[in-house]
Image: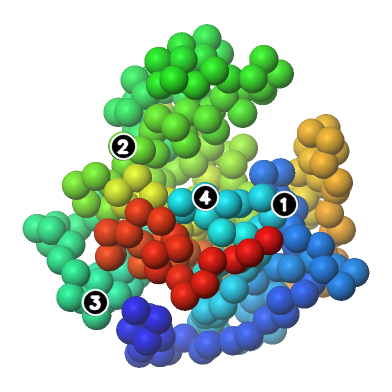
Amino acid sequence: MIRAIRGFLDARGSLEVETPALVRSPGVDVHLDAIEAGGGYLATSPEYHMKRLLADGSGPIHQLGKAWRAGEVGAWHEPEFSMLEWYVPGADDAALMDETEALVRHAAAALDVSLGDGAPFDRITYREAFDRHAGFDPTTAERRRYGMLLRASGTRAPKQASDADLEDLVIALVVQRELGKDRPVFVTDWPASRAALARVRPGRDADGAVSAARFELYWRGAELCNGYHELTDASEQRARIERDNAARIELGKDPYPVDEDFLGALERGLPDCAGNALGLDRLLMVLTGADDIGDVRTFRVAL
């Protein structure tokens, strides 16, 4: 599968690059915790370093390698996992969804795996996904709707859970399980509050509300990738990092160092581009019908 993916990207003129595994800043994400090592952190993603290369004129690039995240253990998770991350200058999120679908089809063909009837992958917005599988619009729903739905699914939410926490639980325990049962589906137009490193813009929903230019691909209930039409505004990115660090502190977590080299790259000028991070272990799981990540890895990580 990896050989097929490398060939696919090479044919499209993408340059394979290598970035450090040990970093000063693992990025700032409220819900991702890094593993400390050697006075720094193991990289949760190569994104910051790859964007520094893009700002210096690399052109289209990709990296296949390891990433690390603390506390992620289960049938679909390992603290160390294999990731493909790639960037395409001049592309937006719609164009990168097209390329992602072509890449997944190429990987499936290499393993002689059928993708069903050959119809294009479905595309629905975040709000449409909630409406179909939770029965309400998350932008207008009252808090009690989340609690009722979680209880019906056999989960009791913690009393101290925030509205965002409840929404995350509904995504993971109700909505996600129903996504991509018949064919892979892209979930687009995430809430602006979940933009992370994506730009925001008027969305595709009927009211045109502002949303993140972000997509995730789901298949057989598994999240496979997370892609953005990348934010290029350094001041906005700094504000988001500061906001996320403040949220980490509020949750009792340590804040992470701000990567000034990354922000400096945005200030120099990140080209208009789209990027995607695809979990290779999970892709292989859904392509082979495996139920546990250990079935597609030579070794389980022992931590």
**Label 2 Cα crowd, 10 Å radius (few <14 / some 14-19 / many 20+):** some
- Residue 67 image-quadrant placement: bottom right
For badge 3, the amino acid type reads Leu
Distance between mark 3 and mark 1 Cα atoms:
34 Å
Point out the tag, 4 or 1, that comes first from the N-terminus.
Answer: 1
Mark carried by residue 178:
2
The x and y percentages for residue 280 are: 44, 69
Distance between mark 4 and mark 1 Cα atoms:
16 Å
Residue shown at the point (47%, 28%) measured from the top left:
170
Nearer to me, 194 or 148: 148
For badge 2, the amino acid type reads Glu
Q: Is residue 220 visible?
A: yes
Distance between mark 1 and mark 2 Cα atoms:
27 Å
Mark carried by residue 33:
1
Mark carried by residue 74:
4
Q: What element carries label 4?
A: loop
Q: In the figure, 157 relative to 230: above or below?
A: above
**Label 4 Cα crowd, 10 Å radius (few <14 / some 14-19 / many 20+):** few
Name the residue that disc number 3 marks. Answer: 111
